[in-house]
Image (cartoon, rainbow, N blue to C red):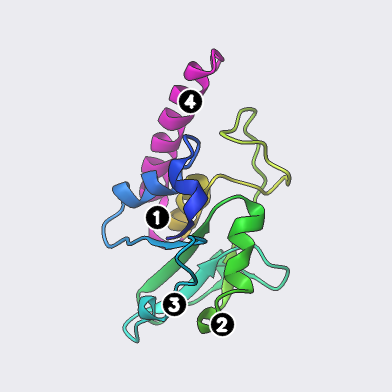
Amino acid sequence: MVIHAKELKRTTNSGRLALFSLANSVMRVRGAISGAVNLSDLLSAEYESYILYPTEDALELDTIKPTKPVQLIVSDGNWRQASKINTRHPELKHIPRVKVSHHNLATHHLRKEHFATGFSTLEAIASALAILEGAKVGESLSILYQAKLRATLDGRGIQLG
């Protein structure tokens, strides 16, 4: 997880929840005043690495045929912050981008979604891991997201139906 520093204090951040829920996950913070962070230490020859970010040329995740265990690098932040992984980290330029393009049909979100295929970080990870590791893994993360969503909306005085 490459998380933008401003996301660390947001109550609507779901990426950190994913980190706490997944074995073998690590966090790198970018966008801090201390300067640029080099992410090359994330890359390892024992994994086939992909960046989960929906660029125009991103591959549909369900079309990849990995020959090694997959390392999914996820950029966490609002759309503008998350997109910087594509321009400010030359050490990751050669890593293929992947996406999950199904529509988000939910009626309530942690934050406003600007695209029909927009998801919170945790929802995107749940969809990606459902493809890579099976529906059960994705479902358990989706249940976690729903609990976070309910708690957040309850705090706003909004009840889910």
Q: Amino acid at mark 1?
A: Gly
- What x and y, as percent, mark residue 118? 65, 47
Pick whichever of labels 4 and 1 is earlier in the sequence: 1
Which stretch appears magenta?
132-161
Residue 10 position in % (x across, y down): 49, 39
Give the residue at x 50% y 83%.
91
Q: Amino acid at mark 4?
A: Thr
Drawn side of residue 137 relative to residue 9, left or right: left
Q: Which mark is residue 134?
A: 1
Q: Earlier in the sequence, mark 4 or mark 2?
A: 2
Disc assigned to residue 38: 3
- Callout 3, which amino acid? Asn
Counting residues from the start of the chain, the first of labels 1 and 3 encountered is: 3
Residue most extreme to the front: 33
- Residue type (three-letter) at the residue carrying disc 2: Pro
* SS category of the residue bearing label 1: loop
SS at badge 2: helix
Residue at image position (44%, 47%) is 8
Q: Position of residue 132 (x, y in %)?
A: 43, 62
Q: Earlier in the sequence, mark 1 or mark 2?
A: 2
Marks 1/2: CA distance? 32 Å
Q: Which residue is mark 2?
A: 90
Question: Of circles 3 and 4, which is in front?
Answer: 3
Q: Which residue is mark 4?
A: 152
Alpha-carbon span between mark 4 and mark 2: 36 Å
Determine the residue positioned at 59% across, 63% down: 53
Judge whether 145 appears above or below 65 on screen.
Answer: above
